[in-house]
Amino acid sequence: MNLSLKGFILYTLIALFAVTLASCSGGEKKSNETTDESTANTETHAKKKTILFFGNSLTAGYGIDPEDAFAGLTQERIDSLGKNYRVINGGLSGETTAGGLSRLDWFLEEEPNIFVLELGGNDGLRGIQLSETKNNLLAIIDKVRAKYPQTHIILAGMQIPPNMGQEYTDEFQKIYPAVAAEKNVTLIPFLLEGVAGDPALNLPDGIHPTEEGHQIVFETVWPFIEASI
């Protein structure tokens, strides 16, 4: 083999090595870019602030699609505005203030930027002692505030029909402004304003709103959410 042929072979081998190295580097770079993009997307999702609706069947959207309940409608409005918030629906049908207090810790694993407390209606319908309902609401607020002092708390006021007598009904209604004043939290005077008692806006049970009813509830709740985001 003459010198020129050796030189040609050596040149060819060097060129092939260079191409292979460039290909590997390019693949590694592309892989790194994909990983970086995935990490960025994960971080963006993680940075979303949280709105926690913590309540009973009214929050859960009993009898309708949860997306059509007022919590789901809140997420829809937030998305349409491009706000970096996600809504967690912590509603549980049949929940009382005592039950809410007992399951609250699970929902506080993650900090809620806004905490909407909607409980007490089932207490009133069951005739639970008013002092117990009030104390449980106070305790829920205290627990949230102790763990996350910066969380904005909104208390949804509730009213009940006079099944337990007018005196009980009147005193029940007073619990919410009293708790809101004592704990200095935002009060929605009456969650079901314009909906309660209207057969056209409630399911046959007369208690739970229809989709149309939830739309009205959402319009009642939204100004309080909008002012906090």
Image (tube, rainbow, N blue to C red):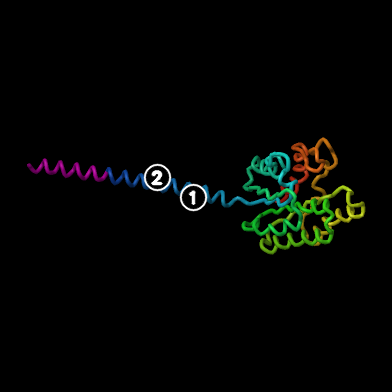
In the image, what residue occupies the spot 86% across and 55% down? Answer: 172
Vertical placement of residue 96 versus 65, above or below: below
Q: What residue sits right under mark 1 in the picture?
A: 39
The secondary element bearing badge 1 is classed as helix
- Across and down, in percent, residue 66 comes to 68, 42
Label 2 neighbourhood size at 10 Å, few (<14), some (14-19), many (20+)? few
Comparing 31 with 120, the one in front is 120
- Tell me if 18 is positioned left or right of 125 in this view: left
In the image, what residue occupies the spot 80% across and 58% down? Answer: 133
Predominant SS along the magenta part: helix
Answer yes or no: do the residues labelled 1 and 2 have beta carbons within 8 Å? no
Q: Where are the magenta residues, as a range?
A: 1-18
**Quadrant where the N terminus is found in the figure:** top left
Q: What residue sits right under mark 2 in the picture?
A: 30
Vertical placement of residue 102 versus 27, above or below: below
In the image, what residue occupies the spot 76% across and 36% down? Answer: 212
The secondary element bearing badge 2 is classed as helix
Q: Does residue 12 belong to the magenta stretch?
A: yes
Comparing 213 with 22, the one in front is 213
In the displayed image of the protein, which residue is found farthest to the right?
Answer: 166
Which kind of residue does numbered mark 2 sit on? Lys
Measure the alpha-carbon separation of dots 1 and 2.
Answer: 14 Å
**Which image quadrant is residue 208 in?**
top right
**Which image quadrant is residue 148 in?**
bottom right
- Across and down, in percent, residue 16 comes to 23, 42
